[in-house]
Amino acid sequence: MTAKAPTSLQYCFDSDLRMKPAGESSFEGMITANWSVNGDPNGGYLMAFMAAAMRELSDKKRPVIVTANYLARGETCLSRVIVEPISKGKHLNRLQAKLMQNGVEKTRCWGTFMGENEYADTNCYEKEPPFLPSRENCFPFPALPRYTLFSSMDILLDPSCAGWLKGGGNLAGISEHRGWIKFHDNRPCDHLSLLLMADAFPPPVLAKHGALKWVPTIEYSVSVRSIADTPWIKAVFRSYFVTGGIVEEDGELWDENGKLLVVSRQIAQFRKK
């Protein structure tokens, strides 16, 4: 496992995770507008912000499982994270956190933390990384007003799942997005950035159903397995079932050397606008 990225404020993401102590087991910082989707802070950014606060109170610094429940729409504003340790063991620390904005709890998060290099050599894969076209042959996700996330990240979609962006009713037959991702400012990968990246692609149901859907996240869980050795990261996200207004999204992130970085799952609402 490579060393984690330096927390230099030359990178926008690090600057936007800054916080300061604000009382016992509490931290305060600004949720910025640099990682927004239709004007709302991206859920992966909110998770990374809360994980950074939980890590401050953990002597084990590697977030290996982080789960968030989104209770209300987040805002770009001064925010407080209240952290509560749950358990401390030989190998794992568990904590929970509340994201408070204007006196209202917006997100509840649970984090499991492990030592930096513990179990780093135990790897066994029974699945291959996704096959992707070269980056030159992929479709750059466009920067859009109020969608600042897509200006802060470079996202390249496999053309076979990008038809919904091109118009003309050229939709894919399955709900899947595949592509490449990295920070626009070339920030190196670390554990907190993977929490954001696993939520940075548009919902895969859009590939099949088109852009006229609303897919707000209810729950988001990320299992961080390793850190990338390459600047670009491969991503694949797949949804199989839409039932009762609920859709799941299973995701994987891999580096270019075939190393698994993240396994993720989201549960979201599926609504027509």
Image (cartoon, rainbow, N blue to C red):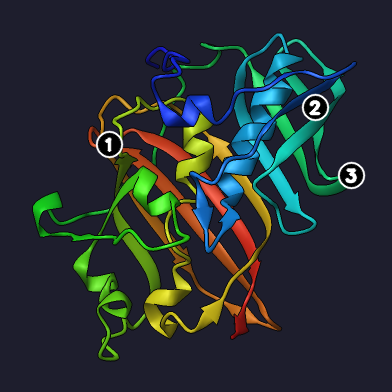
Image point (41%, 63%), residue name: 145
Residue 19 in view (yes/no): yes
Circle number at residue 103: 3
Circle on res. 95: 2
Name the element at disc 2. Answer: strand
Left or right of 208, for residue 168: left
User: In which quadrant is the N terminus drawn?
Assistant: top left
- Gap between marks 2 and 1, in whole Å? 31 Å
Check disc 3 and give the amino acid type.
Answer: Gly
Q: Residue at x 79, y 33 (%)?
A: 80
Q: Residue furthest bottom?
A: 169
* Badge 2 vs badge 1, beta-carbon distance below 8 Å: no
Question: From what the image shows, is residue 78 above or below residue 198?
Answer: above
Where 105 falls versus 244 (above or below)? above
Give whichever of discs 2 and 1 has the lower sequence position.
Answer: 2
Taking the image as shown, residue 108 lies to the left or right of residue 34, namely: right
Check disc 3 and report its element: helix, strand or loop.
Answer: loop
Residue 254 vs residue 164, the one in the foreground: 164
> Mark 1: few, some, or many residues within 10 Å (few <14, many ≥20)?
some
Could you give the CA–CA distance between mark 1 and mark 3, rounded to whole angstroms?
44 Å
Residue 37: x and y in percent read: 52, 59
| Front of the two marks 2 and 3 | 3
The CA distance from mark 2 to mark 3 is 21 Å
Q: Position of residue 241 (x, y in %)?
A: 57, 77
| Residue 127 visible here | no
Image location of residue 178, percent across then percent down:
31, 59
The residue type indicated by label 1 comes to: Gly
Disc 3 crowd rating (10 Å Cα; few below 14, some 14-19, many 20+) is few
Q: Within 10 Å of the Cα at label 2, are there few (<14), some (14-19), or many (20+) other Cα atoms? A: many
According to the image, label 1 marks what residue? 258
